Image (cartoon, rainbow, N blue to C red):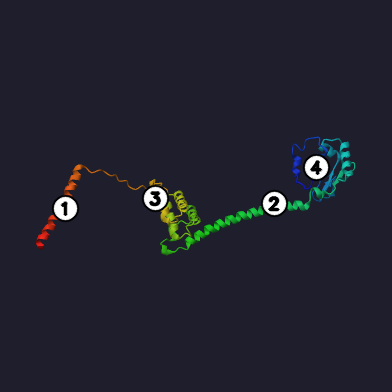
Amino acid sequence: MAYGWISIHRKIQDNLIWNDKPFNRGAAWIDLLLLANHEDRQVLFNGNAIQVKRGEKITSLRQLSERWGWSITKVKKFLNLLSEEKMISYKSDSKKTVYSIVNYEVYQDNENTKSNTEITLKENRNKTEINQKEIKKKQTIMNNNINNLNNVNNNNGVGQSELNLDDPKLAELIKLYQDCGFGLISPYSAKVLSDYMDMYSFQWVKEAIEIAEQNGVRTLAYIRGVLNKKKTGVDKSKNNNFKKKETYYRPKSNEEKTKETRNVNNNALNSFIENMKKANVSK
């Protein structure tokens, strides 16, 4: 035996496939469920106001016959079958037929319908609240950055008027600077980033900050070095192994050797003469 239930919108009755005739008994039964009132209400019938309860419907054998593509006799037999199976109760006369679904709550429970509606509304509220919290968080971060710049320390020589605090690109660089671990930005550092952006470009400064973070050198000087290298077209990695200047040995010529030998001999001879002179003077 199957348990649980699904919701079927009454708009299905307007579907082309649903109106395919003749109905089978299963489709006719579902159609009776869809036609039944889902709440108590008053309706006009032959100029009279009639109270129709939840799970009930005022119709006629002829209307059901045209709706399902059946004969009136077949409609009446079907209603009798449902009545015998305790699925409906109905009364019929020459003007109308009033049927009532037995245990209508099994097919459409007010509490379940209400619960599902409340769950959907709650989910939508939660999504809205999450989105609002994210927006508020971003605004708080942005406001903190701006407040940090507004509380300028004039000892750094940077005034608020020198910075365009409404520039979204500068705000993005400041956030990236702090997210990459450079620390809480100072007015001076913000001014330097602004100057770098003017000298080079927003994209270049952004890439330079990311490169500095990747290489673990979180300084403004390093960022400036990366920008200078990029500007001059130099693109060397951090761990370049520069080759030492190579020197080559050139054999000396015979003339150079003779001259060098002669100089050595002359030096030795001069040294010997000097020593002899000193010896004679001592005697």
- Local secondary structure at mark 2: helix
Cα separation, mark 2 vs mark 1, equals 110 Å
**x and y percentages locating residue 155 in the rendered image:** 41, 64
- Local secondary structure at mark 1: helix
- Local secondary structure at mark 3: helix
Of label 2 and label 3, which has the lower sequence position?
2
Q: Is residue 24 above or below residue 172?
A: above
The residue carrying mark 4 is 30
The residue carrying mark 1 is 268
The residue carrying mark 3 is 228
User: Residue 272 sits in which quadrant?
Assistant: bottom left
Of label 2 and label 4, which has the lower sequence position?
4
- Looking at the rendered image, the disc whose residue lies closer to the viewer, 4 or 1, is 1
Of label 3 and label 1, which has the lower sequence position?
3
Cα separation, mark 4 vs mark 1, equals 130 Å
- Looking at the rendered image, the disc whose residue lies closer to the viewer, 2 or 3, is 3
The residue carrying mark 2 is 120
Cα separation, mark 2 vs mark 4, equals 26 Å
Is residue 42 in sight in this rendering? no
